[in-house]
């Protein structure tokens, strides 16, 4: 049996491995301008699909890598929050719409907020704190009572998980792993080929951004589900995934981890609060952005332009915090980590996020037209 010292060492490896991966991603995302909200905005305002194809290519790489590892038995995404038998479709839709609209008002999603924060944007510091606060209120506070009592119960229950391989395999467990590999290669490969049909994607910057983010998601799955898995924890004698907040396999997401980062900072002396994979990922992205900004000479302090700008960012941050928890993730959490598991709920949430972002952009255009 594994010793308690070995368990502690594995937990640290998961946490700091996540930090190292996200440190690299913070640099790469900053240099390649990886941004989902920006991708939607580019389509609406410029009819430019390059950043959207970059995001979709990252999803494709994550799907291929995650499903191949799952099919090979190296990771088990069936234990993650994205693939549970309970499909909370209303939460996915409402949360996704709120998050998408909010990220437009707040000038970017949770990941972009961390990237801007690392580069000296004080507006993003405010957004991060408010987003984390409202996320915590939705996880465990006053909004959690309404969420659990009114929204989450409206759901569909499957006999197996809500991920596509198990939905297709049904009760034939022997088919799940071959389906994971086959669907991963077909869906992920097809999506990747489509993104590369555009000449603008066959350039170094978008390719590097897409591949790095996609592989980063896969690497964190491997950390939490393979390297961090112990079949028998010496303290409980039960199977355990080390270093994660949920006790399940996790990959990257940046809304609930923002809440837990604030909780850890406020309750630092509480020995029950520990550094986890998600918190380390938050720190890593911000640190990577700072490193890139300092080295490239682009670090700049930036504040709010006025009362309206402040109000928009505060409302947007609140919507992202509430919506990100309800939807079970953000543009990275559901948008890439969730979709890499081929979860139906993740697909619903991502479509809702995009629709919410489109509504937010139309709202901004309407406001500008009124002022002219």
Image (cartoon, helix red, strand yellow):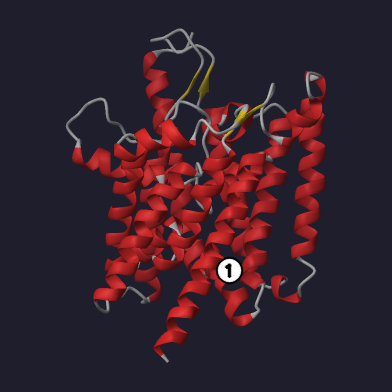
Q: Quadrant of residue 344?
A: top right
- Residue in the image at 59% along x and 56% along y: 212
Q: Quadrant of residue 304?
A: bottom left
Provide residue 145's location: percent of width, then percent of height: 35, 33
Residue furthest left in the image: 269
User: Which of the two residues, 149 or 166, is positioned nearer the viewer here?
Assistant: 149
User: Which of the two residues, 344 or 61, is positioned nearer the viewer here?
Assistant: 344
Count the marks: 1
- Residue in the image at 41% along x and 54% along y: 320
Residue 312 shown left or right of residue 104 in the figure: left
- For disc 1, the neighbor class at 10 Å (few under 14, some 14 to 19, many from 20) is many
Provide residue 77's location: percent of width, then percent of height: 62, 31
- The vertical placement of 270 against 234, above or below, is below
- Residue in the image at 27% along x and 70% along y: 310
Q: Quadrant of residue 9?
A: top left
Can residue 206 be seen in the rendering of this structure? yes
Residue 358 shown left or right of residue 288 in the figure: right
Provide residue 90's location: percent of width, then percent of height: 55, 42
- The vertical placement of 48 against 57, above or below, is below
Can residue 302 be seen in the rendering of this structure? no
Residue matched to label 1: 40
* Helix, strand or loop under label 1: helix
Provide residue 135's location: percent of width, then percent of height: 36, 45
Residue furthest bottom in the image: 372
Residue 225 shown left or right of residue 115 in the figure: right
Residue 91 shown left or right of residue 165 in the figure: left
- Residue in the image at 36% along x and 41% along y: 138
Q: Which quadrant, please, contains the C terminus?
A: bottom left
- The vertical placement of 54 against 23, above or below, is below
């Amino acid at each position: 049996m594994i010793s308690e010292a070995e368990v502690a060492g594995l937990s640290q490896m998961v946490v700091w491995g996540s930090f190292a991966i996200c440190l690299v991603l913070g640099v790469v995302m900053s240099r390649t301008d990886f941004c989902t909200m920006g991708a939607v905005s580019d389509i609406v305002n410029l009819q430019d699909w390059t950043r959207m194809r970059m995001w979709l290519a990252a999803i494709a790489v994550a799907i291929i890598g995650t499903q191949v590892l799952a099919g090979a038995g190296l990771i088990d995404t069936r234990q993650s929050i994205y693939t549970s038998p309970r499909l909370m479709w209303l939460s996915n839709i409402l949360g996704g719409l709120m998050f998408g609209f909010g990220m437009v008002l707040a000038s970017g999603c949770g990941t972009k907020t961390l990237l801007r924060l690392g580069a000296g944007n004080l507006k993003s510091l405010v957004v991060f704190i408010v987003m984390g606060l409202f996320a915590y209120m939705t996880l465990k506070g006053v909004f959690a009572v309404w969420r659990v009592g009114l929204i989450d119960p409206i759901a569909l229950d499957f006999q197996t998980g809500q991920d596509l391989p198990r939905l297709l395999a049904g009760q034939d467990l022997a088919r799940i792993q071959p389906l994971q590999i086959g669907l991963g290669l077909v869906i992920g490969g097809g999506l990747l080929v489509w993104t590369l049909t555009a000449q603008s994607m066959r350039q170094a910057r978008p390719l590097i951004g897409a591949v790095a983010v996609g592989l980063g998601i896969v690497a964190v799955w491997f950390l939490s589900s393979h390297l961090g898995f112990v079949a028998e924890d010496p303290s409980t004698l039960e199977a355990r995934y080390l270093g994660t907040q949920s006790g399940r396999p996790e990959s990257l997401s940046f809304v609930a981890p923002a809440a837990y980062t604030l909780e850890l900072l406020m309750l630092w002396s509480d020995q029950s609060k520990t550094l986890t994979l998600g918190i380390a990922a938050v720190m890593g992205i911000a640190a990577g952005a700072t490193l890139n900004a300092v080295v490239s000479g682009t670090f700049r302090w930036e504040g709010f332009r006025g009362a309206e700008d402040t109000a928009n960012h505060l409302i947007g941050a609140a919507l992202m915090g509430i919506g990100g928890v309800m939807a079970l993730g953000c543009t990275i959490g559901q948008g890439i980590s969730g979709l890499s598991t081929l979860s139906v709920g993740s697909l619903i949430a991502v479509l809702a996020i995009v629709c919410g972002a489109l509504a937010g952009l139309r709202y901004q255009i309407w406001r500008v037209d009124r002022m002219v």
